[in-house]
Image (tube, helix red, strand yellow):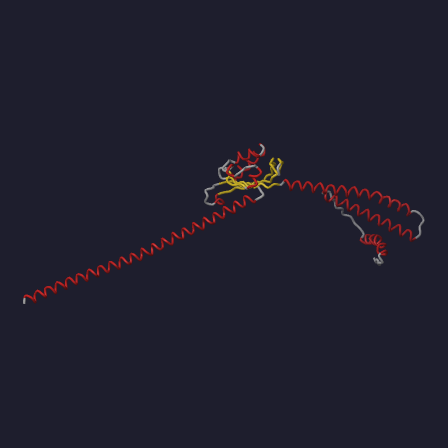
Amino acid sequence: MQTKHNVAAANAADGADAEALRAEVNALRGEVSRLSRELRMSQRFLDKVTKTVEAKDALGSALSLVNAKQRTYTDMLLEGCNNIILLFDDDGRLVLSTKVFLELTHTPNFDYIRNEKYESILARYLDEETAAQMEQAIEEVIRTHDTAVLTIWADVAYNGSLQRRCYAVELRSIGRAKGGNAGISAGALAVLVDLTDLLQEKQRAEAASRTKSDFLANMSHEIRTPMNAILGMSEMLSRSQMTVGQRKYLDDIRKSSQALLSIINDILDFSKIEAGKMELLDISYSLHMLLDNLGSMFALLCRQKGLVYRQ
């Protein structure tokens, strides 16, 4: 009996231990499940962080590439532009310039003049009066955020010699809206266009035009003199005794001479037009008489060419 009792007690103890073990196993399973969920959540969060970092790195690389390209394009623009372009910041310091400005001023590198105030740059390369004019215009543009246009003359080294050159200057205000987030509150952009060659070509064209006008005027006067003599002789000849045919020929000579004299006057009118002295006259004329005069001029030419002229 005692042995059976001991076996039952042992079995009960084993059952309790098994139950406790199952409870502990279940608890461990629950903990493992919870830890697995947390691990999966941590893994997803880590994946998101990794993707965010990768996206940030990719965006940074793309922005760096874009900025590098933009700097390259800016350098190409500054080197290839034929006009002088100067950019001053809100303190009036030079931050950008085209290569042509460095060449004209014999500046080896832009770093030599970077961050210089515009007062010192203008005083170095312009005469006192022109420099003061430019300084006043730049200060006015920065203050009023407006645009100014002026013309200046400067002595610059051009094609190996010191020459007096004419420049058209346009000054524009650069404000925060245009400067973006660079912290620029105000500035000025100066664009200088060399007009010297254009002015020289204009002067040569005007001189050629004056020469042509003088030539036409002189030639017209030279031709007018014998034409007046022909008209005078025709008038004298008309007072003599002539046959009907001879008088018709004389009338043709007189009409042709008058027509040629009118053409000479038209040539003089062209000279007046170029000189800006053309005057329009409001007069009456006979269309029938005009056509009759044209007929007298061209009838002989038509007969010589075997043509029939009809009025």
Q: Which residue lies furthest to the right in this view?
A: 241
Q: Which residue lies furthest to the top in this view?
A: 128
Residue 261, horizontal then vertical, whole percent: 82, 46
Q: In this orientation, which residue lies closer to the viewer: 300 or 99?
A: 99
Q: Residue placed at 11% from the left, 64% from the top? A: 10
Horizontal arrangement in the rendering, residue 166 relative to residue 142 (left or right): right
Q: In this orientation, which residue lies closer to the viewer: 253 or 292?
A: 253
Quadrant location, the N terminus: bottom left
Q: Residue placed at 82% from the left, 42% from the top? A: 222
Q: In the rendered view, tell whether residue 21 sits above or below residue 105.
A: below
Residue 281, horizontal then vertical, whole percent: 76, 46
Horizontal arrangement in the rendering, residue 156 relative to residue 250 (left or right): left
Horizontal arrangement in the rendering, residue 272 relative to residue 199 (left or right): right
Q: In the rendered view, tell whether residue 110 sits above or below residue 242.
A: above
Residue 252, horizontal then vertical, whole percent: 86, 51
Q: In the rendered view, tell whether residue 252 sits above or below residue 169.
A: below
Q: Residue placed at 25% from the left, 59% from the top? A: 32
Numbered circles on residues, count: 0
Q: In the rendered view, tell whether residue 243 sits above or below residue 117.
A: below
Q: Which residue lies furthest to the left in this view?
A: 1
Quadrant location, the C terminus: bottom right
Residue 95, horizontal then vertical, whole percent: 50, 40
Q: Quadrant of residue 83?
A: top right
